[in-house]
Amino acid sequence: MKVLILGGGLVGRSALQVLHSLGAWCTVMDVNYGTLRDIGKTYNEKVNTQLSTKQNIKKLLPETDMVINCVKWPKERKDYLIERDMLNLMEKGSVIVDISNDTDGAIESFRETTHEHPTYIENGVVHYCVSNIPGAIANSTSVAYAASVLPHIQSILNSGVKSACIKDGFLRRSLTAYKGYLTHEETSAIQNRPWIKPEDVLHIQEERLDPAPPATSTKSNNLLSI
């Protein structure tokens, strides 16, 4: 089985781990060369890695049995990684699994499905676009989610929001609202609401902050300062 995984983040790597262990020949595409090099080293170069471009995707689609989309597509983009007419390059009965599940996301032929009716066929290609995939194993998902969230809750309880966000960049980037202020840039851009950086509203600009990942690729011009 030949699988194309779009996106080499946590979700993409998790899908790769399962599929590779099952014996699938996997190709991972990403826009970050460092990510691709890391995946190659992890799997002793037994996984194909390529730069994520529409041209590279077109070359692989005719020999791909399954595409797994793990790309969080920027909301402001109006193009697609896989356009509807590119489905004609795939063999009939091939499968697209859209884990990202974004309307106007990376796959033009996407439409949301449910566990009751999980698939639909377009241009002979089976689409699986369930928006709540973990709901199929709700108990296990809840236990795993609670285990991952609990350390953050404990950190806030023991240190307070300010200190916890200084020590944990991921937690700081997760702050969505604080004392009446919106602190999440992507939400600001989508809802056209003013927002403020978490570092500013917490007054921790001068602190030695734990490095934080980029909050979002969607930018807002509605930034407040206090």
Image: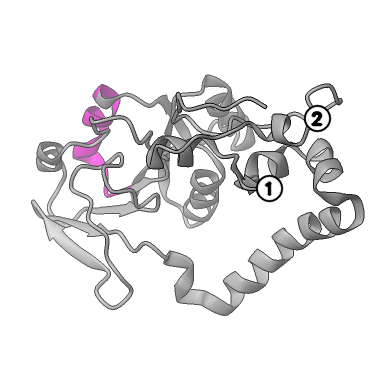
Up-down relation of residue 25 to residue 139 (above or below): above
Q: What's drawn in magenta, residue-wise?
A: 55-67
What secondary structure is the stretch in magenta mostly built from?
A: helix
Residue at 17%, 57% (x, y): give it: 93
* Residue 60 is one of the magenta-drawn residues: yes
Residue to which mark 2 is pinned: 204
Amino acid carrying mark 1 in the image? Lys
Colour treatment of the image: one colour
Helix, strand or loop at mark 2: loop
Along the line of sight, which residue is nearer the eye, 18 or 214? 214
Tell me which numbered mark, 1 or 2, is placed earlier along the sequence. Answer: 1
Give the SS element for disc 1. loop
Query: Dividing the picture into quarters, in which one does residue 116 lie?
Result: bottom left
Q: Residues within 10 Å of mark 2 (few under 14, many from 20)?
A: some
Which mark is nearer the camera, 1 or 2?
1
Disc count in the image?
Answer: 2
The picture places residue 193, in percent across and down from the top left corner, at 45, 38
Residue 10 locus on image (x, y percent):
57, 45
What residue did someone put label 1 on?
179
Q: Identify the image quadrant of the C terminus.
A: top right
Most distant residue in the right direction? 158
**Crowd band around label 1 with a 10 angstrom C-alpha radius: few (<14), some (14–19), many (20+):** few
The image shows residue 212 at horizontal and vertical percentages of 69, 31
Establish if 112 lies above or below 167.
below
Horizontal side of 221 relative to 206 (left or right) equals left
